[in-house]
Image (cartoon, helix red, strand yellow):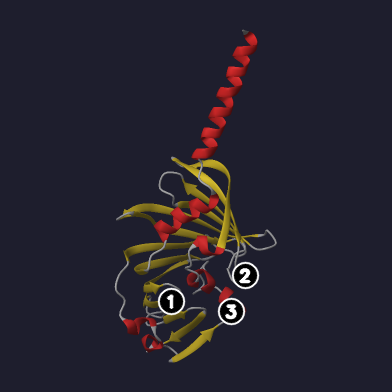
Amino acid sequence: MTHLKHKIQIVIVFTLFYSVLWSQPTGNEILDRIDANMSAETRYVKSKMIIHGPRSSRTVESESWGQGESSFTEYLAPAREKGTKMLKLEDKLWIFSPSTDRTIQISGHMLRQSVMGSDLSYEDMMDDRKLSEVYDAGVVGSETIGEYDCWIVEMNATAEDVAYQMRKLWVDKDRYIPLKEELYAKSGKLLKKNELTNITRHGSRWYPGKMTFKDMLKQGAGTEFIIDEIQFDVEIPEHILSKASLR
């Protein structure tokens, strides 16, 4: 009788173990769900960056249009940045400065430079590909952030031209939106952290209203990227995503 009871207990334990395992999505399934929230065919964003430097903070306002691997951003404030424009067409980036009335092309290692002294690089601003297209992912654990139970997902790049070869995400298990992110170099060195907050619903998707980036190799308290307005799958006039928009 005791032997039979022991066998039943083992069967129950294995049943519970496999039911938990089967209910857990794979890393790549989680990336697909994140892409469904974060990616869109086209988008319009009006935003502000609050850059917290070692001695002071400043705010830069802009509006952007994006379609696939192309995007256009125009800076609206402060006065000394107003009229600066940034155009990305696939893997090429141009910047127009009204103070010099010149357009320059940014390429190679210069893409790793800071955008207007912030904790974001040009690469950060440019790379809008779906995570599932350039990373392979695995679930390595669970952790609670605030009131939200999260999957911990480790991602390794499957493409050479990504800004970060390794990334770690804390993904809300209910809404499939990252709440925290760590970005690593190929060597394993931690380069940046990002916290995603003010999560709100936009139709069928969840999207963060605020992202706080911290460049771990730089002084300062980080950069807040705050979304004032966002629209998904909007119609973008053809001239906006062309060099004609730089003038």
Q: Which of 67 and 225 is in front in this view?
A: 67
Q: Picture coordinates of residue 193 (x, y %)?
A: 55, 57
Pointer 1: what residue?
70
Vertical comparison of 159 with 29: above or below: below
Which amino acid type is shown beneath numbered disc 1? Ser
Q: Which residue lies furthest to the bottom in this view?
A: 101
Calculate the distance from the C-alpha at mark 3 to the C-alpha at mark 1. Answer: 19 Å
> For numbered disc 3, what is the local secondary structure?
helix
Vertical comparison of 114 with 144: above or below: below
Which amino acid type is shown beneath numbered disc 2? Glu
Pointer 2: what residue?
160
> For numbered disc 1, what is the local secondary structure?
strand
> For numbered disc 2, what is the local secondary structure?
loop
* Mark number displayed over residue 29: none
Pointer 3: what residue?
110
Q: Nearer the viewer, residue 175 or 78?
A: 175
